[in-house]
């Protein structure tokens, strides 16, 4: 359902001269590629058609008499549709079909009225589409409504009733489920969604539509206005079959089954694209509507294009998840970049997004966004997009690189917009706190009464103190006994027969060196789990063993838990030959591992490993807490593809 276009934040174009992409093939192999004029297999970079940092119009002030959350119903005529249709004459308080009492008009477009009504028999709010008695579309719309009733999935705004107006002057009705919420179009006026939220919305759409496609039923009107996010963070699809019947397109009647399915899939891809960058990938040649105005882009600027088509989301805006960038290109591009396979069915899209999401669930983040919206406020200068940073471990990417502009997060009650839980005031790791939704922006937080805690009796404190002393004594006795026996370890992670226990390991791929800030972080545990059959692997790089000439190297940062003397590090590798270096922080007093650039580390040993394992020994033992196992040249895996793997890391004194 369409809505009048309004101002929308522009997309950020990356400042960096190169763009790094990753690709996942059928064998689960991830490939890193570059988009640059002087790189192999370049993807031409085009400047956006307009200034990427366009300002955002302030949101319209809400009507205090309206519900804060209402179903998204358009107020304009859909593009290309005539408004010369008969309109029913109704008013609030009218009761139709003996049970539906009209309460509030939500939209009027193309001769169709949309009202919120009350079902007097079942005591619930419903959504009613009203057609005049002599409307020529009535038969088709009611037939579509009956077919749409087959869609019982909870992600559809279900059809509850279809009523033919038999009495003189009595209109025909299509009665649907009422779901308080906001359209995705309105939600994107706040800025792009996080990677988790965008992937979740698109996956829900694809998952819901695949079963309908198998029955030969197609929506054909999926867009940001027919996707509703409810107050509880759930995704609802509006107007299934009904929208196409109310506003038909003659050309659609000639489309084959596969073409209609692909149209729905392309629409889902556009929704995903818009959710990531708040740009709409519309037609290459802008089509004008009947008033001579450009066809709507759902309140967003048009996506920039180059000779190959729309730029991918990562080319439009920095910080977009590489995996979602690839999926967008697979859906929307006639010939996806980097020889990726196209996604042409809803099932293919659902499986691709499910693989990226894993067990992650975006509904809690969307609920939080609904309860505490991000609203633009007046400010000087250009407006940059706000990225709602949200953890998405399954995607392996957090959008920390996105710029923030003149947007203010409306904080939950009792918390400021600069809450330490997140840069944008959202706590991305916990469910939203139940609260009444905000209607006009940030409001002063209520003061909560201080929580009074009763003081435990002194005897309880005495018992706790005695227990702690006993525990300390027990630990000391065990340590002494182990040392006397020439024991095999030190409690807390010290030596173990000359070996030093590793406390943690992280991937190392600094953006300052041209990386993405991550290198398969979900595989890191395999590099020190004691099983040489499992391994952390780098991405696959094309054309050159030196990481495709994209960056100087990648590796793993080893945390020993405390400063210790290190005499050697044994590394079990996958593939040969591999050039590997052992480094320590250049700042010996650093209390955290440097992650900005490889230049912050000093090389103390290096080798070209031609066997399955290599032992790196510095000239003399060094005292450090952090070690960097750094790979600068990778073995060939096939053709012009290069990748390295680290199966085990062992540190010894």
Image: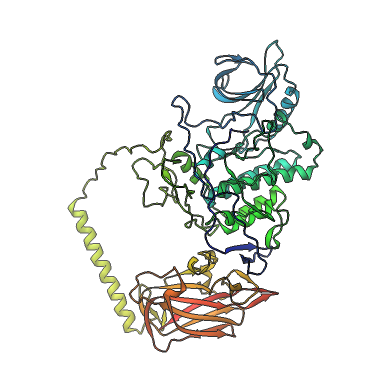
183 vs 298, nearest the viewer: 298
> Outermost residue toward the left?
458
From the top left corner, tell me how far across and down residue 6 is, in percent.
55, 36
Tell me, yes or no, if residue 259 can be seen here: yes
From the top left corner, tell me how far across and down residue 539 is, in percent.
59, 68
> Outermost residue toward the bottom?
619
From the top left corner, tell me how far across and down residue 288 is, in percent.
68, 37
Q: Count the marks: how many?
A: 0
Compared with 578, 52 (above or below) is above
642 vs 231, nearest the viewer: 642
From the top left corner, tell me how far across and down residue 239 is, in percent.
65, 33
Q: Quadrant of residue 158?
A: top right
**Residue found 36% across the figure and 79% down from its top:** 564
Q: Quarter of the image containing the N terminus? A: top right
> Outermost residue toward the top?
168
**Residue found 68% across the figure and 11% down from its top:** 169
Colour scheme? rainbow
Q: Is residue 238 left or right of residue 585?
A: right
Q: Quarter of the image containing the C terminus? A: bottom left
Compared with 410, 83 (above or below) is above
540 vs 405, nearest the viewer: 405
**Residue found 60% across the figure and 62% down from its top:** 21
Compared with 598, 468 (above or below) is above
Q: Is residue 496 left or right of residue 311?
A: left
Q: Quadrant of residue 75?
A: top right
77 vs 468, nearest the viewer: 77
Tell me, yes or no, if residue 149 can be seen here: no
């Amino acid at each position: 359902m369409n809505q009048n276009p309004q101002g929308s934040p522009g997309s950020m174009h990356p400042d960096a001269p190169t763009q790094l992409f990753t690709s996942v093939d059928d064998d689960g192999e991830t490939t890193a590629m570059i988009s640059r004029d002087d790189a192999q297999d370049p993807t031409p970079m085009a400047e956006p058609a307009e200034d990427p940092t366009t300002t955002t119009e302030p949101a319209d002030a809400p009507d205090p008499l309206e519900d804060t959350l209402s179903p998204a119903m358009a107020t304009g005529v859909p593009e290309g549709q005539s408004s010369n249709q008969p309109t029913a004459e109704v008013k609030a308080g009218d009761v139709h079909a003996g049970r539906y009492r009209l309460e509030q008009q939500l939209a009027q477009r193309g001769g169709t009225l949309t009202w919120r009504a009350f079902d007097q028999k079942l005591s619930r709010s419903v959504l009613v589409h009203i057609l005049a008695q002599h409307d020529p579309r009535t038969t088709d719309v009611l037939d579509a409504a009956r077919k749409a009733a087959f869609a019982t999935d909870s992600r559809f705004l279900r059809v509850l009733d279809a009523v033919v107006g038999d009495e003189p002057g009595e209109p025909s009705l299509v009665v649907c489920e009422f779901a308080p919420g906001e359209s995705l179009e309105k939600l994107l006026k706040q800025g792009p969604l996080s990677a988790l939220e965008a992937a979740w919305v698109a996956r829900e759409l694809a998952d819901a539509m695949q079963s309908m496609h198998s029955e030969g039923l197609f929506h054909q009107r999926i867009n940001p206005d027919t996707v509703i996010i409810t107050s509880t963070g759930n995704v609802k699809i509006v107007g299934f079959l009904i929208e196409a019947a109310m506003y038909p397109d003659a050309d659609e009647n000639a489309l084959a089954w596969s073409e209609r399915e692909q149209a729905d899939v392309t629409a889902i891809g556009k929704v995903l694209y818009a959710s990531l960058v708040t740009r709409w990938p519309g037609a290459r040649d802008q089509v004008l509507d009947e008033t001579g105005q450009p066809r709507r882009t759902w309140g967003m600027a048009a996506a920039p294009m180059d000779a190959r088509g729309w730029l991918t989301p990562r080319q439009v805006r920095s910080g977009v998840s590489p995996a979602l960038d690839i999926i967008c290109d697979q859906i929307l591009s006639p010939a996806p970049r980097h020889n990726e396979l196209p996604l042409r069915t809803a099932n293919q899209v659902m499986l691709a997004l499910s693989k990226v999401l894993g067990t992650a669930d975006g509904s809690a983040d969307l609920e939080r966004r609904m309860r505490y919206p991000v609203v633009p406020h007046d400010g000087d200068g250009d407006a940059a997009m706000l990225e709602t940073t949200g953890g998405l471990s399954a995607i392996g990417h957090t959008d920390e690189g996105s710029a923030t502009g003149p947007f203010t997060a409306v904080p939950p009650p009792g918390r400021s917009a600069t809450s330490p839980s997140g840069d944008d005031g959202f706590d991305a790791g916990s469910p939203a706190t139940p609260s009444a939704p905000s209607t006009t922006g940030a409001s002063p937080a209520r003061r909560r009464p201080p929580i009074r805690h009763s003081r435990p009796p002194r005897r309880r404190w005495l018992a706790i103190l005695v227990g702690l002393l006993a525990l300390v004594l027990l630990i000391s006795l065990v340590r002494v006994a182990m040392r006397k026996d020439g024991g095999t370890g030190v409690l807390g992670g010290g030596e173990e027969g000359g070996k030093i226990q590793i406390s943690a390991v992280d991937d190392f791929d600094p953006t300052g060196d041209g990386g993405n800030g991550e290198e398969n972080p979900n595989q890191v545990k395999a590099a020190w789990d004691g099983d040489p059959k499992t391994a952390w692997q780098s991405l696959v790089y094309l054309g050159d063993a030196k990481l495709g000439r994209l960056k100087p190297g990648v590796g793993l940062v080893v945390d020993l838990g405390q400063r210790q003397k290190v005499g050697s590090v044994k590394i079990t590798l996958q593939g040969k030959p591999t050039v590997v270096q052992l480094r320590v922080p250049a700042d010996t007093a650093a209390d955290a591992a440097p992650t900005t650039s490889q230049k912050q580390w000093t090389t103390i040993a290096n080798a070209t490993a031609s066997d399955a394992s290599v032992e790196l020994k510095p000239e003399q033992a060094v005292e450090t807490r952090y070690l960097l196992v750094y790979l600068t040249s990778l073995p060939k895996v096939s053709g012009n593809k290069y990748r390295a793997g680290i199966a085990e890391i062992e540190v010894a004194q």
